[in-house]
Each structure stands twice: as structure tokens, then as C-alpha cells.
């Protein structure tokens, strides 16, 4: 099955749909971190070595988190489809009735509007707000929203 452009990527034989940071982007961040780390080691000025070293650590940490949280967001198919969100502490699963609201909100960043997917979910005894951008999902959040509503069969009162 070939996915449509901008749509979810099938991950296994059950055609679980999933969204994640693109692997080439994570590899590029890793390579950049290694180059900066090399520059920090080979540098002669102490202040520049510190700043470049901190930048290298930041890039390598970002790449590590990106690889650890793959896929960032996915839907497990079945009679009762479930939303799976990978975080630092591991995957969290949410049933359809635990998803309180799903929507796409545009935030202003660097002088332009950037869409973000917002999910309000019931986690244990508290509500949790999950926000995903294009970096997390690998595609436009509006495409993910459309596919989530269809895959999880969310009702209109849970979307806005």
C-alpha cells in the first residue's frame, strides 16, 4: 500500500498508521552534532570551545530524543482503535473516550503562522495537553488531524 502524499505512513502488516520525525532529518542533526563536537575538541579558545560544545550536546540530545520517540504518534487498528503517543517515559495509549478534544491551532513563530496539532486527553486522573508540530510528525499537522479523526472515528464534539 503506497501512502498518499502528506498522509500517514503504514508501519506494519496491520497497516497501523504512524507519524514520526523523518529519519534523514535526525541523521542530519546527528551529523551536525558530531561536527560541532569535533570543532569543540579541536578549538583553541576556551570560550568558543564551551559554546560550540554546548551546541553539540544540544543537537546530539535532540537527535537522541528523536530516535527514542519513534514513532511519535500512531493509531493501533482494531475494533476499538487506540492512540499511542511516545514520550520520554515510554508509550502511552489512549482509547477514543480518553481523547477529550483534537484540533489544529496556528501559532505565530518567527513572523509566520505555524500549525500545531493539539490533543486534550484524559491521563490517569488528570487532563493532559499534547502538542505536536511538523518536526514531531514529519508532515503537516492538518493532514494528521484529518487522518486521526477518520482512524479513531472521533465525533464532531471532540474536534474543533
Image (cartoon, rainbow, N blue to C red):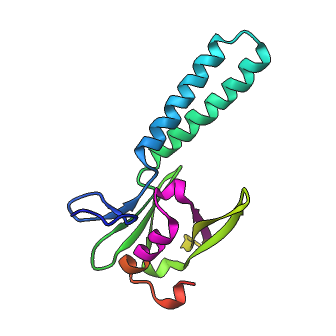
Instruction: Identify the residue at horizontal 69%, vertical 62% (top origin).
Output: 112
- The location of residue 22, given as percent across then percent down, is 43, 49
On the image, which quarter does residue 73 sit in? bottom left
Instruction: Identify the residue at horizontal 56%, vertical 60% (top origin).
Output: 133
Tell me if residue 134 is in the magenta stretch.
yes
**Measured along the vertical axis of the image, is residue 97 above or below residue 34?**
below
**Residue farthest front in this picture:** 111
On the image, which quarter does residue 150 sit in? bottom left
**Measured along the vertical axis of the image, is residue 135 above or below residue 24?**
below
On the image, which quarter does residue 53 sit in? top right
Figure quadrant of the N terminus: bottom left
103 on left or right of 82? right
Which residues, given as a range, are shown in magenta? 128-148
Instruction: Identify the residue at horizontal 73%, vertical 21% (top origin).
Output: 50
- The location of residue 156, given as percent across then percent down, is 50, 90
- The location of residue 104, given as percent across then percent down, is 57, 74
- The location of residue 38, given as percent across then percent down, is 58, 17
Amino acid at each position: 500500500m503506497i501512502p498518499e502524499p502528506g498522509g500517514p505512513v503504514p508501519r506494519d502488516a496491520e497497516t497501523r498508521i504512524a507519524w514520526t520525525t523523518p529519519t534523514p532529518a535526525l541523521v542530519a542533526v546527528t551529523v551536525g552534532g558530531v561536527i560541532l563536537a569535533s570543532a569543540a575538541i579541536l578549538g583553541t579558545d576556551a570560550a568558543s570551545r564551551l559554546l560550540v560544545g554546548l551546541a553539540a550536546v544540544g543537537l546530539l540530545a535532540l537527535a537522541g530524543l528523536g530516535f527514542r520517540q519513534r514513532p511519535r504518534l500512531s493509531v493501533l487498528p482494531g475494533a476499538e482503535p487506540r492512540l499511542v503517543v511516545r514520550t520520554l517515559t515510554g508509550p502511552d495509549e489512549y482509547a477514543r473516550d480518553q481523547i477529550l478534544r483534537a484540533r489544529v491551532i496556528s501559532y505565530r513563530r518567527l513572523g509566520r503562522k505555524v500549525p500545531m496539532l493539539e490533543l486534550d486527553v484524559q491521563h490517569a486522573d488528570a487532563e493532559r495537553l499534547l502538542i505536536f508540530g511538523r518536526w514531531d510528525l514529519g508532515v503537516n499537522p492538518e493532514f494528521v488531524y484529518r487522518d486521526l479523526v477518520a482512524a479513531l472515528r472521533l465525533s464532531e464534539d471532540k474536534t474543533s
